[in-house]
Amino acid sequence: AVPLSTMIQDCEILKLNNFNAVRTCHYPNSTEFYRLCDWYGLYVCDEANVEVHGMQPMGKLAADPAYTDSFAERATRMAQRDRNHASIICWSLGNESGRGSCLSVARSRLRALDPSRPIAYESGGMLIQGSGRTELTDVICPMYPPVADVDALGTRPDEDRPVILCEFTHAMGNSNGNLDKYWELFWDESKPRIQGGYVWDMIDQGLRKKDPKTGREFWAYGGDFGDEINDKQFCINGLWFPDRKPHPAVEECKVLQQPVKFELRSGGTISSKMDGPHVMSIGVRNRYSFKDLEHLDLRWSVISDCGTLASGSLPSLGALEPQFSISAKECGAAALAGMPAVPSRVWLNLAACLRREEAWGPQGHVVARGQFELKLDLDGAAAGPDSPSRSTDSIFRKLTMGTLTGARTGMVSSGNPEASLSVRASDNGYAFVIDDAPAVEVDELTGGLRALTTPSGKALLKEPVLFNVTRASTDNDRGGAQMLMDFVLPPAGVNLVGMIVGTDLFSHEYHWGQNGLDASAPPKQVCRGVTVDDSDLKEGKVSYAEAACAGEMVKAADGKGLFDVSSTYRVHRNGDVKVTCKVKAKNVKKGLTSLPRVGLTLALDPSLFNISYLGRGSGDTTGENYPDRQSAAFMGTHSGTPASMHVPYIVPSENGARTDCSWACFADVAGEGLIIRAGPGRAGASFSFSAGLHTQAELHEAEHTYDLPIRKQGVDPVYVNVDHRIMGVGGDCSWLPCVYPEYLVEPGDEYEFELWLC
């Protein structure tokens, strides 16, 4: 049984993360739980202990009169026990039990017992059984409908019932993409019948166990107990790990369902010419149904890519249009001149915090957040989020590790711009020599960078920098029609079905495997030729030399060409390297709708574990974000380590990405290392990256965390993926492909991107 202390913990973490309702799937909970919901203020949909999922047809028992009392009494006993709890706002007849006379009788008896509360019931998702919109339910409550279907249900002219999804956004592993699209509908005041939904589900239902061979502890799931008939990790689909540590998606939920909405009404430009107070006006929308905002304080800060400019607080959000001012001393010309670099981007961060301790949360707890990018007017020229950076080069010439990680003050890489530079042949490649020391080496076998060396002689790479188009599959990547067929058909049968009816609904992972994009056997990079150009350098016309590599990525198994690739390395006298890449898929098989990613992969020296970056997220596990899950990932300068940024999903997978990055820095404890930055001068140029202690192949092949080799930070290489494009994670469900079109990486496109290695 779940102890009372755990029930209290569960209620509190729900409240702390802005959840306001619970569905007790798929049976009533203990009485103590309802008392806690009464106390803390959580709505409850109380569900009867009825389910026949797996029976064919699903409604067989519901249509059998012999089971009438069995169905009805489970509903009425629930109501007789629980009806005096104020937290219960809705009854549920059960889950996935089809449609029939037994359920009709159960509904009638429940209604007679309690006419005050609505009754919900989804039926089971089958066409003939109904899917949350039948005569059995007062609430339209489908499971896992895509956003477009929710919109259609909520705007049907022949309906007046509310739409509350009984299950949506399947939280299995690295998931819960597209969630913002649902919340756009839930908050849309022009569609009042669309009212929300219940995330499936709250807690990963793994059990603590030790691997008998290694003694390493892990969370066990289906098949780990000698059980031959099981659903594998389909019980591992919660927003929280079994020990109640949150998945990164919890923060996404919290921000999207927060009860306060912010708007920047005025004062959105910061000017270096300001000589008096700069007033900002904030619009605040109260989304509570029954209370004002008197219990919340407002905290604000103006941050830049070079540090915090100003901050403050207001004592109450009772006023719905608060104002505050920033002084010239904080953001004027003198203040900006005193920073380690000239800011190029500025944001306003807002936080609504508890004024006093509540039963479920401490004073100061952040209830709602908001961020707005401000325009920055330097010397009269305003720059916004899409403007080309005016000072990218100056920023990176002035950046100090003191600004980034708190290590020593000094350049990460402060090469001499007047140094001598030459190119010479080396073993199977070319070396760019700066002041008689090899600084950059290009491998003519792969076309990748095989060596980067700092002015002090520190080698930064453990393996060559190569193209990367694969990723360790997530549970959603594996979700497809063939996965469902795997339970009843042998592999040959699955392939035969695919040949007959097509593979459009087969998983992304299936199609990646068919196209040679299996992360456990990634394509190999082969160079077909290297062209070195140092003629202008020798003539004194430029301060750099170039090596252009043309080649392809071939299938690991048979050498079949998969991608045409090219890369140009422009090496400057100070050691900076401009990398320009092109990638174009070829021989793509029908059905491939998305590449996993397009970018580069690096294996850095183990000492480079101090990571800072300008982009979305934070430096811990909660900062993970993807193109379709970034509402809670605010922009800013963040720091962390490969260990802190890794998310230990119970089934290891792709994890830890940070999107919309302008630069990322990897340094040792002395402050020496590597900066990767997006190409300067390109409007909106950015990249995604992740850093960890395991390769994509190791993550892909592991079924449990104990399958991953034990790695130690500072001893083992830092594996970095730098992505020009990365596919979203999806989340509508985990048994069919569910990444929305705008978050796919089109296999037919040609991709060109530019990075600087400094």
Image: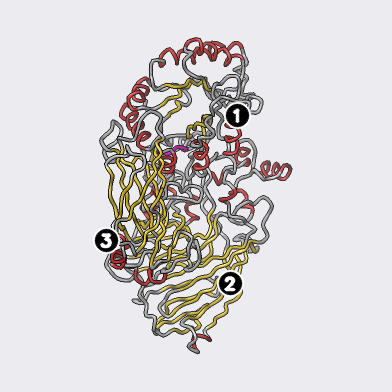
Q: Observer-nearest residue: 343 or 104?
A: 343
| Residue type marked 1 | Gly
Q: Which mark is residue 409?
A: none
- Which corner quadrant holds the N terminus? top left
Q: Judge whether 361 appears above or below 134 on screen.
A: below
In this rendering, the label closer to the viewer, 2 or 1: 1
Q: How is the image coloured?
A: secondary structure
Q: Observer-nearest residue: 330 or 526?
A: 330
Whether residues under marks 2 and 1 lie with C-beta atoms below 8 angstroms apart, the answer is no
Q: Quadrant of residue 568?
A: bottom right
**Residue on which disc 2 sits:** 527
Decide which of tag 1 and tag 3 comes sooner along the chain.
Answer: 1
| Residue type marked 2 | Cys
Are there few (<14), some (14-19), or many (20+) residues within 10 Å of tag 2? Answer: some
Which residue lies most toward the bottom here? Answer: 539
**Residue on which disc 1 sits:** 125
Q: Judge whether 126 appears above or below 442 on screen.
A: above
Q: Judge whether 318 appears above or below 274 on screen.
A: above
Distance from Cα at disc 2 to Cα at disc 3: 56 Å
Q: Tell me which segment is drawn in magenta.
A: 236-241
Confirm whether residue 340 shows in the render. Answer: yes
| Residue type marked 3 | Lys
Look at the magenta stretch and give its main secondary structure: loop
**Residue on which disc 3 sits:** 329
Tell me where residue 146 appears, x and y as whole percent.
Answer: 58, 38
Tell me where residue 199 appears, x and y as whole percent.
Answer: 47, 35
